[in-house]
């Protein structure tokens, strides 16, 4: 019996890999649009945060709800978008559990395309969260006190930081076995970062040991940058620190997430 050598797998060009990634990015966007529970959560969470924090804590922490709204809304934007990054890990975990990645492996597409598509597609989640927070904030009385360019920069900075954080979520999604576990471990990671910051109150009112953590927390720098770009104040230093933190998170967690993805997919 004559045996024939197997033809070596054809290497895909970078252009083809990019095209595959963009196709799967659109798949991620469609999953958001066709999942009413996910869309409902994206729309409702920022509204719930604004109402609860402004009207439950505002009078106690700032003297008036309007003052507190001006202080807290940039932080609530950070809170909402950071929690939204957990969607990346949850979707990846669901795709692995349901066998979708097995089908992707059988297709002539770039191996990294499903991971890149999931991360790029989540940009829509972040933009929805930002738009809802700002839109409902305007209804409650929040006003941008800087220029339109500064406001756009605030939104872009938040998206850049979220893209870095979603690699943390992707790593969790590749290490755990279910979407519920992604949510549990994700909250365990995100809670100290978010609530151990100055999102909701000035760190000067916190105990000294907590202030030490708050002052080096990347979420603190990001929140201060958002406040400066939306309501005024010195922005250069905190924006640069936020970008450096985003770059550091990406450099550390992106390779780890890709390695875990390759092992599992």
Image (cartoon, rainbow, N blue to C red):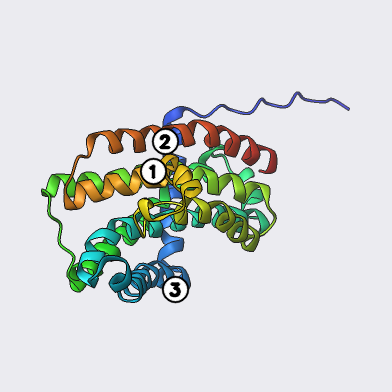
Kindly report the distance in space between the C-alpha atoms of the residues bearing marks 2 and 1.
Answer: 8 Å
Could you tell me which quadrant the N terminus lies in?
Answer: top right
Which residue does the image show at 44% across and 58% down from the upper left?
A: 84
Residue 93 rendering spot, x and y as whole percentages = 62, 55
Kindly report the distance in space between the C-alpha atoms of the residues bearing marks 3 and 2.
Answer: 34 Å
Could you tell me which quadrant the C terminus lies in?
Answer: top right
Q: Return the residue at label 3.
A: 36
Q: Return the residue at label 1.
A: 161
Of label 3 and label 2, which has the lower sequence position? 3
Q: Quadrant of residue 200?
A: bottom left
Q: Is residue 143 left or right of residue 253?
A: left
Q: Quadrant of residue 110?
A: top right
Mark 1 surroundings within 10 Å by alpha-carbon count, few (fewer than 14), some (14 through 19), many (20 or more): many
Q: Is residue 49 left or right of residue 154?
A: right
Q: Residue furthest front?
A: 208
Q: Which label sits on residue 245?
A: 2
Which residue does the image show at 58% across and 27% down from the upper left?
A: 10
Q: Is residue 20 left or right of residue 99?
A: left
Q: Quadrant of residue 247?
A: top left
Mark 3 surroundings within 10 Å by alpha-carbon count, few (fewer than 14), some (14 through 19), many (20 or more): few
What secondary structure is marked by label 1? Answer: helix
């Amino acid at each position: 019996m004559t045996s024939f050598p197997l033809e070596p797998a054809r290497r895909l060009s970078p252009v083809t890999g990019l095209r595959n990634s963009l196709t799967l990015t659109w798949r991620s966007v469609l999953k958001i649009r066709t999942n009413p529970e996910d869309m409902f959560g994206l729309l409702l969470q920022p509204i719930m945060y604004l109402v609860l924090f402004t009207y439950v804590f505002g009078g106690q922490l700032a003297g008036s709800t309007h003052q507190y709204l001006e202080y807290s809304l940039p932080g609530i934007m950070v809170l909402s978008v950071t929690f939204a990054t957990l969607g990346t890990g949850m979707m990846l975990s669901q795709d692995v559990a349901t066998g979708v990645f097995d089908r992707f492996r059988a297709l002539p597409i770039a191996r990294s395309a499903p991971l890149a598509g999931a991360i790029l597609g989540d940009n829509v989640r972040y933009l929805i969260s930002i738009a809802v927070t700002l839109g409902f904030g305007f209804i409650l009385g929040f006003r941008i006190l800087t220029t339109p360019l500064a406001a756009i920069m605030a939104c872009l900075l938040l998206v850049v930081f979220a893209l870095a954080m979603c690699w943390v979520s992707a790593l969790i999604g590749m290490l755990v076995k279910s979407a519920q576990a992604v949510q549990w471990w994700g909250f365990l990671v995100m809670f100290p970062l978010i609530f151990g910051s100055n999102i909701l109150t000035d760190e000067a009112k916190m105990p000294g040991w907590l202030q030490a953590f708050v002052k080096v927390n990347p979420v603190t720098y990001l929140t201060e940058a958002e406040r400066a770009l939306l309501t005024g104040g010195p922005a250069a230093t905190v924006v640069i620190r936020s970008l450096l933190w985003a770059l550091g998170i990406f450099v550390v967690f992106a390779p780890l997430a890709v390695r875990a993805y390759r092992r599992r997919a």
